[in-house]
Every structure is written in structure tokens, then in C-alpha cells.
Amino acid sequence: MKLTVQTFLAGVVLGAIFSLLNLQIPAPPTLAGVMGVVGTFIGFVIIQRFSKVKNNRESS
């Protein structure tokens, strides 16, 4: 949880810096784009966990 909070705060600070420097953010500017990134991450996590469970069953 600590890492999540630190990462969120780093993102907020970085977003503020980009805004102050009038730079485009390196992230999707719309909710649909953000949800695409979240979906990609969730898909990755699901496959990683499934692979670990499968490997544990095969080695038993």
C-alpha cells in the first residue's frame, strides 16, 4: 500500500510539473484512454496470477 501511495503522489507531482511547463502529459487525456491502460494492467495481472497457480499445481 505504501508503494501505491508513493507512486500516486509522484504522479500528482509530475502532472503538476508538466502542467506548469505547458507540456503534454505522457498519458491518455480522456477517461476512455485511462480505462484502456487500467484494463491492460488488469489483464496482465490476471495472466500472471493464473500462470503462478498453474505452475504451482504442476510442480505438486
Image (cartoon, rainbow, N blue to C red):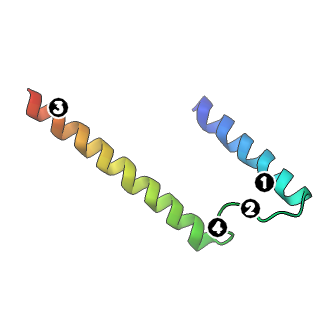
* 41 is higher (above) or lower (below) than 23: above
| Sequence order check, earlier mark of 4 and 1 | 1
Residue 40's x, y, as percent? 44, 59
Q: Are marks 2 and 1 in contact (CB under 8 Å)?
A: yes
Q: Quadrant of the N terminus?
A: top right
Question: Which amino acid type is marked by label 3?
Answer: Asn
Kindly identify the residue that appears in the image at 65 percent across and 72 percent down.
30
The image's mark for residue 28 is 4
Q: Which residue is mark 2?
A: 25
| Sequence order check, earlier mark of 3 and 1 | 1
| Sequence order check, earlier mark of 4 and 3 | 4
Which of label 2 and label 1 is nearer to you? 2
Work out whether residue 59 or residue 32 is closer to the camera in this orientation and state it: 59
Q: Which residue is mark 1?
A: 15
Kindly identify the residue that appears in the image at 80 percent across and 45 percent down.
13
Q: Which residue is mark 3?
A: 56
| Sequence order check, earlier mark of 3 and 2 | 2
Residue 50's x, y, as percent? 25, 45
Work out whether residue 46 or residue 23 is closer to the camera in this orientation and state it: 23
Distance of mark 2 from mark 4, alpha carbons?
Answer: 8 Å
